[in-house]
Image: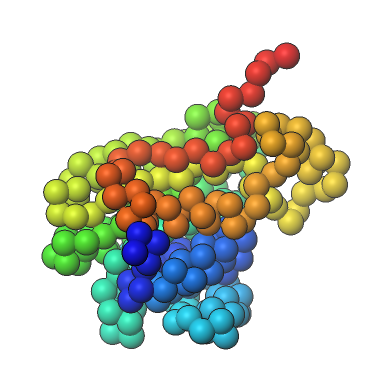
Amino acid sequence: MPGDLSGRVALITGAAQGIGRATALRLARAGAHIVVNDVQEEKAHSVAQEISALGGTAIAEIADVAVFDQVTSMVSSVEHRLGPIAILVNNAGGLPPGARFAPLRESSMDDIERFLGMNLLSMFACSRAVINPMIDAGFGRIVCVSSIAAPMGQMGGTAYSAAKAAVSGFVASLSKEAGRFGVRVNSVLYGNAPHPSRTPDRQAELDTWSHLGRVGRPGEFANAVMFLVSEESSYITGTTLEVDGGIMRMALL
């Protein structure tokens, strides 16, 4: 069946909460065996237990995906416990621990490197670790998470926006390298996603940005990932799916 992922091992990075958690649950409902990756150990195990309680198969793997040695150890562990990884969702990203959003003139190189590590180099590390086994198997699905900050920019977020903008080039190039071997590579560009740190006033402001009058729900973003890893998108690779409620099509009044 087009939406059936039964028996496929899916690694979702940054899956302990939010959109990553929603994606893990969505792919689990389609029959995938889920690897919940995060650096938040307690939350990662909680999501894995949640999936298991629903009748699915899930394990938690604690690793910093910006560190290649940790990624290779994680992939080796997953292969031993569940089998080869068929689906990779490069979801980890956002504000790295210890870093802050700030204008470039106030940003340290340490902060810049942290942003690039979490939001871009992690995708290189994880994709590099799984690409050869996927090619050998003749099957693979890689989805990389981007943001409207890539094409639109973000005040005080030059490093974050630059990292997310690089995702499109990464996806376009890797899809060319891997497509003939049965591996499809795409990205999902999220916009106006929910965040628990927002004040009600800020949330109300963001609601007006969307053509739909609200922020996106985690499950809506997860559905986009599900589409790209399923056979419903069997002739789609190297592209970006915008899931932003129309924010990038806003009219200037």
Total numbered labels placed on residues in the image:
0
With respect to residue 154, does 74 lie above or below?
A: below
Colour convention: rainbow
The image position of residue 145, as x and y in percent, is 46, 49
Residue appearing at x 16%, y 62% in the figure: 138
The image position of residue 52, as x and y in percent, is 52, 84
With respect to residue 181, does 56 lie above or below?
A: below
Residue appearing at x 31%, y 43% in the figure: 236
Q: Is residue 11 visible?
A: yes
Task: Give the farthest residue toward the front.
Answer: 1
Residue appearing at x 61%, y 56% in the figure: 218
Quarter of the image where the C terminus is located: top right
The image position of residue 21, as x and y in percent, is 56, 66
The image position of residue 43, as x and y in percent, is 61, 75
In which quadrant of the rendered view does residue 81 lie? bottom left
Quarter of the image where the N terminus is located: bottom left
Q: Is residue 41 visible?
A: no
With respect to residue 21, does 201 lie above or below?
A: above
Asked if residue 25 lies left or right of residue 135, the reply is right
Asked if residue 213 lies left or right of residue 180, the reply is right
